[in-house]
Image (spheres, rainbow, N blue to C red):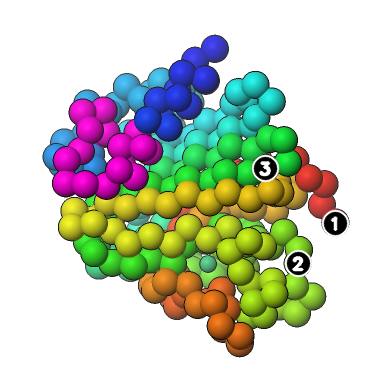
Amino acid sequence: MGGASAVTLATALLAGVLAGSGTSTASEPSAGSGTRTTGAADERGTGSAAGAGSAASGARVGADQVRMVYERFAPPRAINPPRAFTYDRRRVPAGAGIRVLQRAGDGKTTVRVAVHGLAPRYRFGVHVHTKPCGLRPNDSGPHYQNVKDPKQPSTNPRYANPRNEVWLDFTTDAKGNGGAVSRHDWTFRRGEARSVVLHERGTHTGPGHAGQAGDRLACVSVPFAGSKKGD
Ligand SMILES: [Cu+2]
């Protein structure tokens, strides 16, 4: 199948974005140059591209489950809604791109996010949320927590911390590229991790407002693989 090679390519692309510097790799579709023709093949290569600039795929590589999503942000619209919403076109312009790659297996989860075309030199708070994106910024629900805080919304650092939640805060470079990676020794409960949300500032860690990061600027729906049964 083409899945494994597509995933390998995606990893290489992410590495290119994450490397960050002013030079974009030849294979990265649009991080630097503004042209996006060269990268078309990698999107199509998954065999499940849903249209220009939009792709999602799932695969198994060895014992690991892999999910990969690439989307371009678009403003909310009720008819034919996008999978990636921007609620703030100043900091997340329409047409900016986001790629999310998840690997899960052996009781561990790795999530990588890479973006291009966002506001330059800007600190975004970024987390995995429990519901898909929607027309309203809050549709994506609360943060995914491995151990759920009985008190919601959760602002207790015992629960709202980057070990119990998936935080992917990053600061964009001068070109608006950025990315982050998280690793956890647990896996998602199936169907309970559904999106990645970009917030207006880096994530707080102190008591009373831990996990908070200001307004939700943008959101991409991701059907994260989960191997753990729900509670
Ligand atoms: Cu969040």
Q: Callout 3: helix, strand or loop?
A: strand
Residue at (41% x, 20% y) in the render: 45
Residue 24 figure quarter: top left
Sequence-first disc among 2 and 1: 2
Q: Amino acid at mark 2?
A: Lys
**Residue 148 image point, x, y percent:** 75, 67
| Residue at position x 57%, y 44% in the image | 110
CB atoms of marks 2 and 1 within 8 Å: yes
Q: Secondary structure at mark 1?
A: loop
Q: Which residue is mark 2?
A: 148
Question: Mark 3 or mark 2: which comes first in sequence?
Answer: 3
User: Crowding at label 3, few (<14), some or many (≥20) Cα neighbours within 10 Å?
Assistant: some
Observer-side mark, 1 or 3, equals 3
**What amino acid type should be assigned to the residue bearing mark 1?**
Asp
Return the x and y of residue 38 as percentages of the image width and height: 22, 26
The magenta segment: 13-29
Identify residue for label 3: 108
Dot 2 alpha-carbon crowd within 10 angstroms: few under 14, some 14 to 19, many 20 or more: some
User: Residue 80, labelled with which disc?
Assistant: none
Asked if the beta carbon under badge 1 is closer than 8 A to the nearest atom of ligand 1, the reply is no
Q: Which residue is disc 1 drawn over?
A: 231
Q: Of discs 3 and 2, which sits in the foreground? A: 3
Which quadrant of the view contains residue 195? Answer: bottom right
Do residues under tags 3 and 2 come within 8 Å of each other at their CB atoms?
no
